[in-house]
Image (spheres, grey):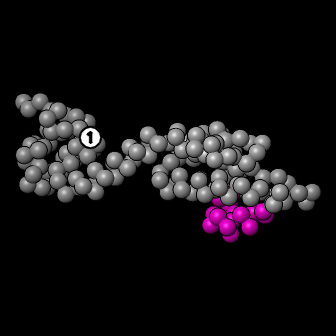
Amino acid sequence: MEWLTIGDLANRSGVATSALRFYETKGLIESERTDGNQRRYRRAILRRVALIRAGQELGLSLAELADALESLPHDKTPSKKDWQRLSRTWRKRLDGQIADLVALRDDLSDCIGCGCLSLKSCAIFNPGDAASDLGTGPRYLLGDSSDEFVKS
């Protein structure tokens, strides 16, 4: 088995050694200790660190990442099936995020039901900020429809 020092892991993963130590304190990654109390990581830890980085870039919390990583075996390198099972647990969440990003990209130039009333279309789709009856924030961007409020 090939072992990496914390410096090797940091260099290969692009993650600072302080972050790697933090991930370890949170139980996201594991190391072995040498007789001199130096950390050594299995090469397979690189994939976990890559997943953590990618997940954080997508907005996943460390708690979500910890839950996902907990589902992987600790006594052996995760197999392709293990990684597929983990990815299935995130599919619905990621599909929702993708849909939200597409909506943001496509609908930002239209009335989004935020209450600013700065666009001419707001007078039609959100007269007098009627969308505020549906809740806070950009109601139409969040999935509500201008048909859902009752005009008084």
The answer to whether 53 appears left or right of 120 in the picture is right
Residue at the image position 44 percent from the left and 46 percent from the top: 94
Q: Nearer the viewer, residue 56 or 44?
A: 44
Category of crowding for the residue at label 1, using alpha-carbon neighbours closer than 10 angstroms: few (below 14), some (14–19), many (at least 20) = few
Instruction: Name the side, left or right, on which 20 lies relative to 39.
Output: left
Q: Which residue is at 64% across, 42% downward?
A: 82
Residue 26 visible in the snapshot:
no
Image coordinates for residue 139, horizontal then vertical, percent: 24, 42
Quadrant for the N terminus in the image: bottom right
Residue extending farthest to the right is 35
The three-letter amino acid code for the residue at tag 1 is: Gly
Q: Quadrant of residue 118?
A: bottom left
* Residue that carries the numbered disc 1 in the rendered image: 143
Residue 42 pos. (x, y %): 77, 56
User: Is 96 situated above or below 102?
Assistant: above
Q: Which residues are magenta?
A: 4-20
Q: Is residue 6 magenta?
A: yes
Rendered image quadrant of residue 125: top left
Magenta residues, dominant SS class: helix
**Left or right, residue 74 beside residue 130:** right
Residue 88 spot, x, y in % from top left = 52, 40
Can I make out residue 92 in this image? yes
From the viewer's side, name the closer residue of 11 and 135. Answer: 11
